[in-house]
Amino acid sequence: MDRRRDIAREISRIYCTLTPPAVQILGSILVPMKFQKGDTILQEGQVCRNLYFVEKGMVRQYYYKNKKDVTEHFSFEGRIVFCIESFLKQEPSRLIVEALENSKVYAIPYDDLNNLLVRNQEIDMLYRKILEHVAISSQEHADSQRFENATERYERLLREKPEIILRAPMVHIASFLQMTPETLSRVRNGSVQNASKQPHSPKDQNDAWWTHATNEKT
C-alpha cells in the first residue's frame, strides 16, 4: 500500500492537490501493472476500463488508417493515458495502446473510480482536472496540425516534450507529426544546422529542458 500511496500522492501533485485522507483513498484503488516493450495494453475493439498512470516507461496510442498505423499520443513518466471516448462511454475502442518500452503503470479502474466520484468531492475534482488536461492537450495537438508547418510542429515537440524525440522510434514520431519519415529527417537536419549557426551561450539554468536533461545525467 505504501507504494500505491506514493503514486496517489504523485498524481495529486501533478493534477490536483488532495488531502492525506483523499490520497489514501485514491491509493487504495490503484492496481500496479507491468508491460514489456511491444506488449499491447489495450487492443482495438476492447473497452477501456482503466486510466493508466505511467510510473516508468513510455506507451503510445495509435490506430490504423489505410493499412498504416498512425500515432495519436505518447505518454511517459508522470502522465496518464486512456482512450477517452471508450472510457467515458464504456464502448469498444478504435484506438490501440502499446508499450514502447518496458513499462510500469498503475491502473485506476472505471468502476472503482466512479464509486469514489459520487462519495468524494476531492476525487471528483481530481478526475475533472485530468479530463481538462487531456482535452487541452488534445486541442493543442490538433491546432498544431492545422496551423503549423512541418518544421514548426517538430520544433514545438522538441521544445515541449523532448522525451519523445529522445526515446520514441522516428517512424512513430513522424506519424504523430503527420509527416513522412523522410520529411521528418529533413526537418531534423534543418533544425540541427540552424542551431549550429546560432551563437554559443551558456544554458540558462532556469530553462525547463536544460534542467530536465541535467537532472537525468546526475
Image (spheres, helix red, strand yellow):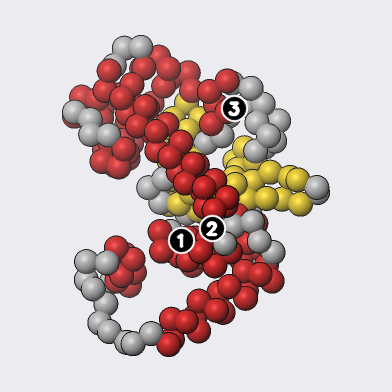
Question: Residue at coordinates 26% horizontally, 41% vertically from top-left?
Answer: 13
Mark pair 3, 1: CA separation: 29 Å
Q: In this view, does 7 lie to the left or right of 42?
A: left
Residue 95 location in percent, x, y?
Answer: 65, 38
- Residue in the foreground of this view, choosing between 153 and 46: 153
**Residue at the limit of the structure toward the right, as seen here:** 67
Please report whichever mark, 3 or 1, sits nearer to the chain's N-terminal start: 3
Extreme-front residue of the structure? 147
Asked if residue 73 is positioned above or below residue 157 in the image, the reply reads above
Q: Which of marks 2 and 3 is in front?
A: 2
Q: Would residue 168 be seen by someone viewing this image from the given angle?
A: no
- The quadrant in which the C terminus is found is bottom left
Tell me the SS state at disc 2: loop
Residue at 40 percent across and 38 percent down: it is: 133
Residue matched to label 3? 86
Question: Residue drawn 68% across and 50% down?
Answer: 70
Q: Residues within 10 Å of mark 1 (few under 14, many from 20)?
A: some
- Indicate which label's residue lies in the foreground, 3 or 1: 1
Gap between marks 2 and 1 measured at Cα:
9 Å
